[in-house]
Amino acid sequence: WKYRDRAYRYCLLDTGHLLENLMLSVRSHGFKLRVFYDYDDHLVNSFFGLDTEKEASLAVCSTLHDESQDLVPARHTWNELPDKAQEASNVSGREVKYETIIQIHTSTLHPMKRYNGSARMDNLLGLVTRDEMKIKELPSWPANLSYSEAVFSRRSRRNFINQPMTRSQFDSVLDALCMDRAPASGFCPISVALITGKINSLSPGFYLLDREVRTLRIVRKGRLLENMASICLDQAWLANASLHILFVSNLRVLDETMGSRGYRHAMLEAGRIGQIIYLLATSMGLGCCGVGAFYDDEATRILDLNESSKPLYLVAVGPVKAIK
Ligand SMILES: Cc1cc2nc3c(=O)[nH]c(=O)nc-3n(C[C@H](O)[C@H](O)[C@H](O)COP(=O)(O)O)c2cc1C
């Protein structure tokens, strides 16, 4: 009800945050988690008795997965859940059916296309970049909290102050953004752009991060944080952050290379990286807040992206009023 048709985006991004939390938590117990974006939705949904008029699975993960076994037992029909169980999942007395959401989700049910080409999303946004900076692999990050302390104290913080982010904090964010993630289909569905303000030893500007070869390239110098704050429905506090991390994708290319399931993949991936940044920022004593509310076309125009490239998610980071 709050986000209406746009809610589908939040479901995907939030699920990405949850997936990464689960991944880190499972890993902290010494296990591995495998995430599947591409699976048979009908089978999984019916296995869990989902009411597919209202509910959907968005990703599947397994721990201690045995590669030789099928992911889901190969039984194609399941007994319907009793009505009582289905009623229990009603969360509101009056439910509104958002046809657009159902249409979008239905179109993502097709299997993901495999991609063997060499195209890269970073080169498909219509941006011209220059001045390459190499991103260091750091032995450690200047974190003051343990993983579990960061999880328990993480909050969305918006009270950014007019103080610079240190260069080592910024380098840690870059290092975290470049952490190894093999794309699920041979094609990385998102690019990461950085809009920077006050950061020690870095000019304010608009940068593009190449996560594969670990370089940062400048697109344009000058402050853009105020423009971004106004694009984000005039959320003025955003202009005080040191850094906006913007996940972008060329939606036309995404559709052509991965099929319509690619959108789901892109949004889940953006949410997952967003969660890592939330935890890293918290552990370094910085504030962080995800932002899903923006005018897509305005962002495309201000950032000079080509017409089919759109922002998916923004994460703001920077020093905040003392965290108590
Ligand atoms: C995908 C996503 C989009 C969000 N968009 C906004 C936003 O546009 N503006 C805002 O102030 N907060 C935004 N938030 C922050 C949420 O309001 C916040 O996460 C939620 O209220 C829960 O609070 P917590 O993060 O402190 O636990 C967003 C968070 C996520 C995960």
Image (spheres, grey):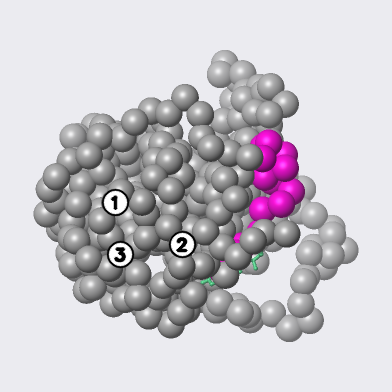
Question: Ligand 1 is found in which quarter of the picture?
Answer: bottom right
Q: Nearer the viewer, residue 49 or 163?
A: 163
> Element type at marker 3?
strand
Residue that mark 2 sits on: 163
Q: Nearer the viewer, residue 268 or 128?
A: 128
Q: Nearer the viewer, mark 3 or mark 2?
A: 2
Q: Is mark 2 within 8 Å of ligand 1?
A: no
Q: Is mark 3 within 8 Å of ligand 1?
A: no
Disc 3 residue type (three-letter): Lys
Secondary structure under tag 2 reads loop
Quarter of the figure with residue 172: top left
Tell me the CA gap for discs 3 and 2.
30 Å
- Quick one: quadrant of the C terminus? bottom right
* Residue 298: image location, x then y, percent: 28, 77
Task: Name the spot of residue 42 as percent of width and height, x first.
Answer: 58, 48
Instruction: Please identify, in this view, whether the residue under mark 1 or under mark 3 is nearer the observer.
Output: 1
Q: What span is in magenta?
A: 145-158
Q: Taking the image as drawn, is residue 1 in sight?
A: yes
Residue 82, above or below 20: below
Among numbered discs 2 and 1, the one appearing first in the sequence: 2
- Residue matched to label 3: 310
Residue in the foreground of this view, choosing between 315 and 61: 315
Decide if residue 11 is in sight here.
no
Q: Position of residue 307 (x, y in %)?
A: 19, 68
| Cβ at disc 1 under 8 Å from ligand 1 | no
User: On the image, numbered disc 1 is attached to which residue?
Assistant: 202
Labelled pair 1, 3 in contact (Cβ < 8 Å): no
Crowding near pointer 3: few (<14 within 10 Å), some, many (20+)? many
Q: Residue at x 46, y 79 (%)?
A: 236
Residue at the spot 25% in from the left edge and 56% down from the top edge: 203
Q: CA distance from mark 1 to mark 3?
A: 26 Å
